[in-house]
Image: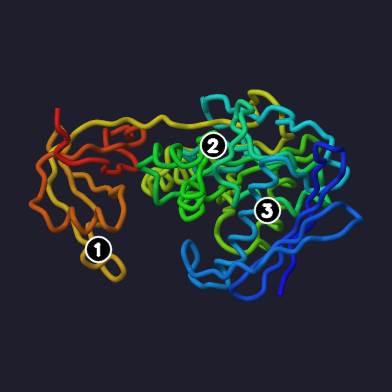
Amino acid sequence: MSTGKRIFKRDTNGTIRTWNYEVDGDRWRSHSGVLGGAVVTSGWTTCVPKSRDTAEEQALFEAEAEMGKKLDKDYAVTEAGVDEPRSFGPKVMLAHKFEGWPGECFSQPKLDGIRCKVNRHGMWSRTGKPILGAPHIFAILAPAFVNKPDLEFDGELYNHELKDDFNKIVSMVRKSKPEDDDILEASKLVQYHVYDLVLTDKTFSQRDQMLDLFVAQLPGNEIVKVPTSPVATIEQLDRAYGTYLEAGYEGQIIRLDGPYENKRSKQLLKRKEFETREFELIAVEPGNGNWAGLAKRIRFRLDDGRECGGGIRGTREQMAELLARPQPKIVTVRYFTPTPDGMPRFPVAIDFDRPD
């Protein structure tokens, strides 16, 4: 049996009310009432697996989701917070364009998700608009604000399985009045990929270490720490960039080991300097082992007749379909700035026989 944190609100009569959940196996119920007064206990809700694998996991999820909805609406994580105005707080740090090697730094993949800052008051877009469509995310993070009320997370609502369908994520989380079915769908697909903490008195390496420790102790896979690598040379930076492109990410984020700045900052750089063009496709090559029966790589012909190989962007289902159908004639390739002898660097196939 587990009991959730008590949350608080002030009602229209000025009285502070509390709410918390209790989970027992595959069922859950709530306890609510006036602070210091009688407690009203609801009946048990027995759960069956929907968005979670087991009934027990479903019960905990539904209880936490209900807490998340209440926190999004009018509850606070502490008694002291019931009268605080809901606030986006300081601005998030925005990136400058990458223009060359900045010195030793940290590398992250650039996501194509919805920027989201999370603080004790809720979830917010980059411009400070409330995000109400993913209360399951807020419910997971809310207990952290009890002991550290000034904690703020910076990340994106994202799922790499939906990397080619940004609008799907938008449709799930941007609704101003999400219905229960919307929230259920979001809970199955939307993750919070967090890449920084809004702490202006810590360097990035300090913030990143704190974030690693925090995310490691969370259950489930709804909160994801964005992979971060220290980089000592431009060659390492370029290799990381190529790896991200081949994996289907939008580009590269570069972070210097400085403070978090609530503005567009030279501490944060974004890199999207690839080129895209069509080539004659020579072959689609199958994979081995776990990739057996799936398209894994391509070979294509350059204008001067030389051959070049590259990866393929897409899901396993798309790779199976590509290998099964007649071989396309034209491949659209995204690649990093060519080498001095004209060979595309880190080429990735993103489309085949694209219509005009």
Look at the image and tell me in which quarter the N terminus lies: bottom right
Kindly check if marks 3 and 1 are in contact, taking CB atoms under 8 A apart as contact: no
The residue located at (21%, 50%) in the rendering is 298
Front-most of residues 172 and 191? 172
- How far is the residue under mark 2 from the one under mark 1? 45 Å
- How far is the residue under mark 2 from the one under mark 3? 17 Å
Q: Which label is found at residue 177?
A: 2
Q: Indicate left or right for 19 with 95 as reference.
A: right
The residue located at (53%, 50%) in the rendering is 191
The residue located at (52%, 31%) in the rendering is 270
Amino acid carrying mark 2 in the image: Lys
Q: Position of residue 127 (x, y in %)?
A: 61, 25
Q: Is residue 259 above or below residue 265?
A: below
Q: Is residue 209 above or below residue 49?
A: above
Amino acid carrying mark 1 in the image: Gly
> How dense is the environment of label 1, judged by Cα within 10 Å: few (below 14), some, or many (20 and up)?
some
Front-most of residues 200 and 67? 67
Mark 1 sits on what residue?
287
- How far is the residue under mark 3 from the one under mark 1? 46 Å
Kindly check if marks 2 and 3 are in contact, taking CB atoms under 8 A apart as contact: no
Q: Is residue 293 above or below residue 164?
A: below
Query: Tag 3's secondary structure?
Result: helix
Amino acid carrying mark 3 in the image: Met
Front-most of residues 207 and 103? 207
> How dense is the environment of label 3, judged by Cα within 10 Å: few (below 14), some, or many (20 and up)?
many
Sequence-first tag of 2 and 1: 2
Mark 3 sits on what residue?
67
> How dense is the environment of label 2, judged by Cα within 10 Å: few (below 14), some, or many (20 and up)?
few
Sequence-first tag of 3 and 1: 3
Q: Quadrant of residue 82?
A: top right
Q: Quadrant of residue 45?
A: bottom right
Q: Position of residue 34 (x, y in %)?
A: 85, 52
